[in-house]
Image (cartoon, rainbow, N blue to C red):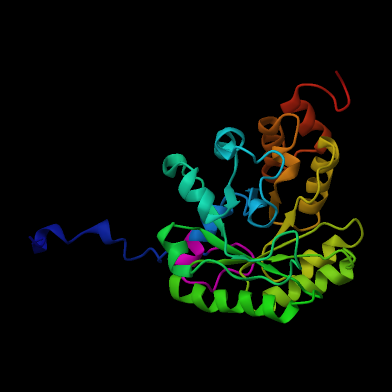
Amino acid sequence: MADNDSRTEGARFSPSVAARPQPYTLKGSAGLDWGMQSRLARVFRPATNRTVMLAIDHGYFQGPTTGLERVDLSIVPLLGHADALMTTRGIVRSTIPPASGTPIVLRASGGPSILRELSDERIAVAMEDAARLNAAAVAVQVFVGGEFETQSVHNMTRLVDESQRYGIPVLAVTAVGKELTRDARYLRLATRICAELGAHVVKTYYCAEDFDTVAAACPVPLVMAGGKKLPELDALTMAYRAIEEGAAGVDMGRNIFQSENPAAMIRAIGAVVHESAKPQAAYDRFFGRPAGGT
Protein backbone atom coordinates (compact mmCIF):
# COMPACT_ATOMS: atom_id res chain seq x y z
CA MET A 1 0.00 0.00 0.00
CA ALA A 2 1.36 3.44 -0.93
CA ASP A 3 2.43 5.88 1.79
CA ASN A 4 -0.12 8.53 2.63
CA ASP A 5 0.78 12.20 2.45
CA SER A 6 1.64 12.47 6.12
CA ARG A 7 4.37 9.86 5.73
CA THR A 8 6.06 11.42 2.69
CA GLU A 9 6.71 14.90 4.06
CA GLY A 10 9.73 16.15 5.94
CA ALA A 11 13.51 16.03 5.77
CA ARG A 12 13.82 12.38 4.82
CA PHE A 13 14.10 13.32 1.15
CA SER A 14 17.11 15.61 1.84
CA PRO A 15 16.23 17.94 -1.05
CA SER A 16 19.20 20.18 -0.24
CA VAL A 17 21.69 17.33 -0.62
CA ALA A 18 22.94 16.63 -4.12
CA ALA A 19 22.90 13.06 -5.40
CA ARG A 20 26.15 11.27 -4.63
CA PRO A 21 27.22 9.16 -7.60
CA GLN A 22 29.97 6.61 -6.98
CA PRO A 23 32.15 6.64 -10.11
CA TYR A 24 34.00 3.46 -11.02
CA THR A 25 37.68 4.30 -10.96
CA LEU A 26 39.37 1.27 -12.52
CA LYS A 27 41.57 2.45 -15.38
CA GLY A 28 39.70 2.77 -18.68
CA SER A 29 36.46 1.37 -17.25
CA ALA A 30 34.38 4.42 -16.31
CA GLY A 31 32.27 4.26 -19.48
CA LEU A 32 31.35 0.58 -19.24
CA ASP A 33 27.88 -0.73 -18.43
CA TRP A 34 27.01 -1.47 -14.80
CA GLY A 35 27.21 -5.23 -15.24
CA MET A 36 30.65 -5.02 -16.82
CA GLN A 37 31.90 -2.77 -14.02
CA SER A 38 30.38 -5.06 -11.40
CA ARG A 39 32.23 -8.07 -12.81
CA LEU A 40 35.50 -6.17 -13.00
CA ALA A 41 35.01 -5.09 -9.38
CA ARG A 42 34.89 -8.78 -8.46
CA VAL A 43 38.26 -9.35 -10.11
CA PHE A 44 40.00 -6.11 -9.06
CA ARG A 45 39.62 -5.24 -5.38
CA PRO A 46 37.81 -1.89 -5.26
CA ALA A 47 39.98 -0.70 -2.36
CA THR A 48 43.17 -0.95 -4.43
CA ASN A 49 41.97 -1.48 -8.04
CA ARG A 50 44.48 -4.34 -8.14
CA THR A 51 44.21 -8.09 -8.42
CA VAL A 52 46.02 -11.32 -7.64
CA MET A 53 44.80 -13.84 -10.18
CA LEU A 54 45.79 -17.47 -9.82
CA ALA A 55 46.38 -18.91 -13.30
CA ILE A 56 45.77 -22.66 -13.61
CA ASP A 57 44.60 -22.91 -17.22
CA HIS A 58 47.85 -24.47 -18.48
CA GLY A 59 46.23 -27.84 -19.11
CA TYR A 60 44.18 -26.52 -22.02
CA PHE A 61 47.22 -26.92 -24.27
CA GLN A 62 49.87 -28.81 -22.30
CA GLY A 63 47.96 -31.34 -20.22
CA PRO A 64 48.63 -32.05 -16.52
CA THR A 65 51.30 -29.48 -15.68
CA THR A 66 53.57 -30.06 -12.68
CA GLY A 67 51.65 -28.80 -9.67
CA LEU A 68 48.27 -29.18 -11.38
CA GLU A 69 48.04 -32.96 -11.47
CA ARG A 70 45.32 -32.82 -8.80
CA VAL A 71 43.65 -29.42 -8.80
CA ASP A 72 41.36 -30.50 -5.98
CA LEU A 73 44.37 -31.03 -3.74
CA SER A 74 46.80 -28.33 -4.86
CA ILE A 75 44.58 -25.41 -5.91
CA VAL A 76 41.26 -25.54 -4.07
CA PRO A 77 42.97 -24.85 -0.70
CA LEU A 78 44.44 -21.64 -2.19
CA LEU A 79 41.19 -20.15 -3.48
CA GLY A 80 40.58 -18.03 -0.42
CA HIS A 81 43.81 -16.14 -1.07
CA ALA A 82 43.14 -15.39 -4.76
CA ASP A 83 41.14 -12.43 -6.06
CA ALA A 84 40.28 -14.47 -9.16
CA LEU A 85 40.97 -17.87 -10.67
CA MET A 86 41.93 -18.15 -14.34
CA THR A 87 40.90 -21.60 -15.48
CA THR A 88 38.91 -23.69 -17.96
CA ARG A 89 35.25 -24.62 -17.93
CA GLY A 90 36.14 -28.28 -17.53
CA ILE A 91 37.99 -27.62 -14.29
CA VAL A 92 35.26 -25.26 -13.08
CA ARG A 93 32.51 -27.82 -13.55
CA SER A 94 34.48 -30.81 -12.32
CA THR A 95 36.59 -29.45 -9.48
CA ILE A 96 35.98 -25.87 -8.28
CA PRO A 97 33.49 -25.66 -5.39
CA PRO A 98 30.60 -23.36 -6.33
CA ALA A 99 30.56 -22.04 -2.76
CA SER A 100 34.20 -20.90 -2.94
CA GLY A 101 33.10 -17.46 -4.09
CA THR A 102 36.32 -16.92 -6.05
CA PRO A 103 35.56 -15.08 -9.31
CA ILE A 104 36.32 -17.08 -12.45
CA VAL A 105 38.26 -15.71 -15.40
CA LEU A 106 37.35 -18.32 -17.97
CA ARG A 107 39.74 -19.48 -20.68
CA ALA A 108 37.76 -19.03 -23.91
CA SER A 109 40.28 -19.81 -26.65
CA GLY A 110 42.10 -23.00 -27.52
CA GLY A 111 42.70 -25.69 -30.10
CA PRO A 112 46.31 -26.71 -30.66
CA SER A 113 48.40 -28.60 -28.14
CA ILE A 114 52.08 -28.10 -27.43
CA LEU A 115 52.67 -30.54 -30.30
CA ARG A 116 51.35 -28.06 -32.88
CA GLU A 117 51.55 -24.38 -33.83
CA LEU A 118 50.13 -22.67 -30.72
CA SER A 119 48.94 -19.53 -32.49
CA ASP A 120 46.36 -21.54 -34.47
CA GLU A 121 43.68 -21.06 -31.80
CA ARG A 122 39.93 -20.67 -32.18
CA ILE A 123 37.22 -19.49 -29.84
CA ALA A 124 36.58 -22.51 -27.64
CA VAL A 125 33.77 -21.28 -25.35
CA ALA A 126 30.53 -19.53 -26.24
CA MET A 127 29.83 -16.39 -24.25
CA GLU A 128 26.47 -17.89 -23.33
CA ASP A 129 28.25 -20.71 -21.52
CA ALA A 130 30.52 -18.20 -19.77
CA ALA A 131 27.37 -16.48 -18.51
CA ARG A 132 25.95 -19.84 -17.45
CA LEU A 133 29.08 -20.39 -15.35
CA ASN A 134 28.79 -16.91 -13.85
CA ALA A 135 32.24 -15.99 -15.18
CA ALA A 136 33.60 -12.64 -14.09
CA ALA A 137 35.58 -12.38 -17.36
CA VAL A 138 36.76 -14.47 -20.30
CA ALA A 139 40.37 -14.81 -21.45
CA VAL A 140 41.60 -15.12 -25.02
CA GLN A 141 45.12 -15.57 -26.35
CA VAL A 142 46.36 -13.01 -28.89
CA PHE A 143 49.49 -13.88 -30.88
CA VAL A 144 50.79 -10.55 -32.20
CA GLY A 145 53.59 -11.45 -34.60
CA GLY A 146 52.60 -15.12 -34.65
CA GLU A 147 51.82 -17.21 -37.70
CA PHE A 148 48.07 -16.92 -37.09
CA GLU A 149 48.13 -13.35 -35.77
CA THR A 150 45.04 -12.13 -37.64
CA GLN A 151 42.99 -15.15 -36.67
CA SER A 152 43.84 -14.72 -32.98
CA VAL A 153 43.01 -11.01 -33.09
CA HIS A 154 39.70 -11.88 -34.75
CA ASN A 155 39.01 -14.38 -31.96
CA MET A 156 39.39 -11.54 -29.49
CA THR A 157 37.23 -9.04 -31.39
CA ARG A 158 34.42 -11.59 -31.77
CA LEU A 159 34.44 -12.14 -28.03
CA VAL A 160 34.50 -8.37 -27.44
CA ASP A 161 31.39 -8.02 -29.61
CA GLU A 162 29.65 -10.75 -27.61
CA SER A 163 30.87 -9.26 -24.35
CA GLN A 164 28.83 -6.14 -25.00
CA ARG A 165 25.71 -8.27 -25.20
CA TYR A 166 26.37 -10.29 -22.06
CA GLY A 167 28.23 -7.74 -19.92
CA ILE A 168 31.24 -10.04 -19.45
CA PRO A 169 34.68 -8.41 -19.76
CA VAL A 170 37.36 -9.77 -22.09
CA LEU A 171 40.94 -10.27 -20.91
CA ALA A 172 43.40 -10.42 -23.79
CA VAL A 173 46.52 -12.48 -23.13
CA THR A 174 49.49 -11.40 -25.22
CA ALA A 175 51.39 -14.53 -26.21
CA VAL A 176 55.05 -14.38 -27.06
CA GLY A 177 56.40 -16.96 -29.46
CA LYS A 178 59.85 -18.50 -29.34
CA GLU A 179 61.21 -16.08 -31.92
CA LEU A 180 59.74 -12.87 -30.43
CA THR A 181 61.57 -10.69 -27.93
CA ARG A 182 59.84 -9.68 -24.72
CA ASP A 183 61.07 -6.11 -24.80
CA ALA A 184 59.12 -2.92 -24.16
CA ARG A 185 58.76 -2.11 -27.85
CA TYR A 186 57.06 -5.43 -28.61
CA LEU A 187 54.95 -5.40 -25.44
CA ARG A 188 53.73 -1.85 -26.17
CA LEU A 189 52.71 -2.99 -29.64
CA ALA A 190 50.88 -6.12 -28.50
CA THR A 191 49.09 -4.63 -25.50
CA ARG A 192 48.02 -1.49 -27.30
CA ILE A 193 46.57 -3.48 -30.22
CA CYS A 194 44.50 -5.54 -27.78
CA ALA A 195 43.22 -2.46 -25.96
CA GLU A 196 42.49 -0.53 -29.15
CA LEU A 197 40.39 -3.42 -30.47
CA GLY A 198 38.29 -3.58 -27.33
CA ALA A 199 39.90 -5.76 -24.65
CA HIS A 200 38.83 -4.60 -21.19
CA VAL A 201 41.96 -5.97 -19.48
CA VAL A 202 45.30 -7.03 -20.96
CA LYS A 203 47.73 -9.59 -19.56
CA THR A 204 51.35 -9.39 -20.61
CA TYR A 205 54.88 -10.18 -19.51
CA TYR A 206 57.20 -8.02 -17.45
CA CYS A 207 60.33 -6.56 -19.00
CA ALA A 208 63.19 -5.18 -16.95
CA GLU A 209 63.58 -2.04 -19.04
CA ASP A 210 60.82 0.49 -19.68
CA PHE A 211 57.91 -1.60 -18.42
CA ASP A 212 56.42 1.66 -17.14
CA THR A 213 56.01 2.76 -20.77
CA VAL A 214 54.12 -0.46 -21.54
CA ALA A 215 51.69 0.19 -18.68
CA ALA A 216 51.34 3.88 -19.51
CA ALA A 217 50.59 3.22 -23.19
CA CYS A 218 47.84 0.70 -22.37
CA PRO A 219 44.55 2.54 -21.67
CA VAL A 220 43.02 -0.39 -19.75
CA PRO A 221 44.30 -2.35 -16.72
CA LEU A 222 47.51 -4.25 -17.39
CA VAL A 223 48.06 -7.50 -15.49
CA MET A 224 51.51 -9.05 -15.33
CA ALA A 225 51.95 -12.69 -16.31
CA GLY A 226 54.05 -14.75 -13.94
CA GLY A 227 55.84 -16.77 -16.61
CA LYS A 228 58.32 -19.52 -15.82
CA LYS A 229 59.08 -20.63 -12.28
CA LEU A 230 61.56 -18.37 -10.49
CA PRO A 231 63.02 -18.49 -6.99
CA GLU A 232 60.37 -17.11 -4.64
CA LEU A 233 62.15 -13.86 -3.81
CA ASP A 234 62.84 -13.19 -7.51
CA ALA A 235 59.17 -13.68 -8.35
CA LEU A 236 58.12 -11.35 -5.53
CA THR A 237 60.62 -8.77 -6.78
CA MET A 238 59.29 -9.00 -10.33
CA ALA A 239 55.73 -8.54 -9.06
CA TYR A 240 56.76 -5.58 -6.91
CA ARG A 241 58.49 -3.84 -9.78
CA ALA A 242 55.57 -4.43 -12.13
CA ILE A 243 53.12 -2.90 -9.64
CA GLU A 244 55.41 0.04 -8.93
CA GLU A 245 55.70 0.64 -12.68
CA GLY A 246 51.96 0.68 -13.35
CA ALA A 247 50.57 -2.86 -13.49
CA ALA A 248 47.12 -3.35 -11.99
CA GLY A 249 47.98 -6.76 -10.63
CA VAL A 250 49.46 -10.13 -11.46
CA ASP A 251 48.19 -13.37 -12.95
CA MET A 252 50.59 -15.97 -11.59
CA GLY A 253 50.53 -19.71 -11.94
CA ARG A 254 53.79 -21.66 -11.80
CA ASN A 255 55.40 -19.19 -9.41
CA ILE A 256 52.63 -20.03 -6.95
CA PHE A 257 51.55 -23.63 -7.42
CA GLN A 258 55.12 -24.83 -8.06
CA SER A 259 56.46 -22.97 -5.03
CA GLU A 260 57.84 -24.91 -2.09
CA ASN A 261 54.97 -23.39 -0.10
CA PRO A 262 52.14 -22.28 -2.42
CA ALA A 263 49.95 -20.89 0.38
CA ALA A 264 52.74 -18.72 1.72
CA MET A 265 53.67 -17.59 -1.78
CA ILE A 266 50.19 -16.45 -2.80
CA ARG A 267 49.81 -14.59 0.49
CA ALA A 268 53.17 -12.91 -0.03
CA ILE A 269 52.17 -11.92 -3.56
CA GLY A 270 48.94 -10.48 -2.13
CA ALA A 271 50.93 -8.34 0.29
CA VAL A 272 53.12 -7.04 -2.52
CA VAL A 273 50.15 -6.26 -4.78
CA HIS A 274 47.63 -4.87 -2.29
CA GLU A 275 49.86 -3.50 0.47
CA SER A 276 52.90 -2.48 -1.60
CA ALA A 277 55.01 -4.64 0.71
CA LYS A 278 58.68 -4.86 -0.18
CA PRO A 279 59.67 -8.27 -1.59
CA GLN A 280 62.04 -9.24 1.23
CA ALA A 281 59.55 -8.15 3.90
CA ALA A 282 56.75 -10.13 2.23
CA TYR A 283 58.96 -13.20 1.98
CA ASP A 284 60.06 -13.00 5.63
CA ARG A 285 56.48 -12.40 6.79
CA PHE A 286 54.89 -15.41 5.11
CA PHE A 287 57.73 -17.88 4.76
CA GLY A 288 58.93 -17.19 8.30
CA ARG A 289 62.60 -16.91 7.42
CA PRO A 290 64.94 -14.82 5.26
CA ALA A 291 65.23 -15.93 1.64
CA GLY A 292 67.89 -18.59 1.27
CA GLY A 293 67.75 -19.38 4.99
CA THR A 294 67.08 -22.72 6.62
What segment is highlighted magenta in the picture?
Answer: 24-38
> For the N terminus, which image quadrant?
bottom left
At horizontal 85% and vertical 18% (from top left) the residue drawn is 294
Query: Which of 85 and 286 lies nearest the eye of the viewer?
Result: 85
Name the outermost residue toward the front: 115
Residue 212 in the image: state x and y as whole percent.
Answer: 83, 62
Residue 56 in the image: state x and y as whole percent.
Answer: 64, 48
Q: Is residue 29 shown in magenta? A: yes
Query: Which of 271 and 188 lies nearest the eye of the viewer?
Result: 188
| Residue 22 in view, yes or no | no
Look at the picture and state if 51 lies above or below 141: above
Q: How many marks?
A: 0
At horizontal 11% and vertical 60% (from top left) the residue drawn is 3
Residue 10 in the image: state x and y as whole percent.
Answer: 21, 59
Residue 74 in the image: state x and y as whole percent.
Answer: 62, 34
Look at the picture and state if 159 lies above or below 43: below
Task: Say whether residue 259 is left or right of residue 16.
Answer: right
Task: Look at the magenta stretch and give its main secondary structure.
Answer: loop
Query: Which of 99 and 237 lies nearest the eye of the viewer?
Result: 99
Look at the picture and state if 49 lies above or below 16: above
At horizontal 38% and vertical 63% (from top left) the residue drawn is 17
Please tell me in which quadrant of the rendered image residue 31 appears.
bottom right
| Residue 168 in view, yes or no | yes
Task: Say whether residue 250 is left or right of residue 168.
Answer: right
At horizontal 63% and vertical 56% (from top left) the residue drawn is 60
Task: Say whether residue 127 is left or right of residue 223.
Answer: left
Look at the picture and state if 27 lies above or below 281: below
Q: Is residue 99 shown in magenta? A: no
Task: Say whether residue 119 is left or right of residue 123.
Answer: right
